[in-house]
Image: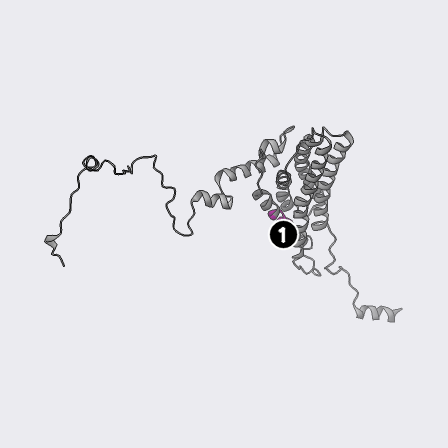
Amino acid sequence: MAAVDDLQFEEFGDGATLLAANPDATTINIEDPSVSFKHQPRPPGSLGREEDEELLGTNDSDETEVFDRIKGSLLPVPGKNFVRLYIRSNPDLYGPFWICATLVFAIAISGNLSNFLIHLGEKTYHYVPEFQKVSIAATVIYAYAWLVPLALWGFLLWRNSKVMNIVSYSFLEIVCVYGYSLFIYIPTAVLWIIPQRVIRWVLVTIALGISGSVLAMTFWPAVREDNRRVALATIVTIMLLHVLLSVGCLAYFFDAPEMDHLPAAITTPNQTVAAAKSS
């Protein structure tokens, strides 16, 4: 083993001297900004921040677009097309999916709380959580948010083959419009807890007016060049289905008569026998 004194550092000449000695040598300047290291391996399981955001849909620009589209669905601009103004050929499924999921739980939970508050204080009433309302609400909301756009997309494609001037939307654009138009029903469903039927119907009317105007102003430009009767029938059908969803959810989850509580006056067997003897 060499002694410590035998160890020494070897000094190399500067780059110019070495290059002069071997002019054919390849040199790389590490300070050169044009040199990129694209193929450097990364540790396993570590993606870049931008790649993570792209996969998860949490990019700041995507979040800004989602919030802008939510605001656009709450404050529709008269005469403006929601697709052209907010979606701009860049539809997303992140917003519509989570809006529908939030709406499902808002309707189911608010419906249970409303039922509890209505019968609060009744001695004969026993509160039983209705978990089936979650599955029913999920079936109704997701069927409306996906099947209706699918049918409308197919109809517009068919009419586009008949009339060349009809505006064509992609299936994802239509899903995006329907999904964001349902956002207004999330706060509406929470306010439906108020046990006043008049207030509930006022709230559903406001929600219908806002969300319905988004649908009407979006799809009327797509069919107005078609036959007048066909165009009007299309818009009327869209609005009727929207009204049916709103009124149906209010009537079933909040205004439905409850059959799981006992009536206030119950005739016991002893009272029945006593009444028979007295007669």
Inspect this view and state whether residue 194 appears. no
Q: Secondary structure at mark 1?
A: helix
Q: Residue at x 57, y 40 (%)?
A: 92
Q: Is residue 25 left or right of residue 270?
A: left
Split into 4 quadrants, where in the image is the C terminus? bottom right
Q: Residue at x 46, y 44 (%)?
A: 51
Q: Is residue 259 left or right of residue 178?
A: right
The x, y position of residue 42, in whole percent, is 38, 48
Q: Is residue 19 left or right of residue 266?
A: left
| Residue sitting farthest toward the left | 5
The colour scheme applied to this rendered structure is one colour
Q: Residue at x 52, y 37 (%)?
A: 64
Up/down of 15 relative to 261, above or below = above
Report which residue position mark 1 lands on: 109
Q: Residues within 10 Å of mark 1 (few under 14, many from 20)?
A: many
Inspect this view and state whether residue 96 appears. yes
13 vs 149, nearest the viewer: 13
Q: Is residue 166 left or right of residue 55?
A: right
The x, y position of residue 163, in whole percent, is 72, 30
Up/down of 215 relative to 45, above or below = above
* Chief SS of the magenta region: helix
Q: Amino acid at mark 1?
A: Ile
250 vs 195, nearest the viewer: 250
Instruction: Report the magenta residues as a range.
Output: 101-107
The x, y position of residue 123, in whole percent, is 69, 60
196 vs 83, nearest the viewer: 83
Q: Is residue 277 magenta?
A: no
Q: Residue at x 60, y 47 (%)?
A: 102
Split into 4 quadrants, where in the image is the N terminus? bottom left
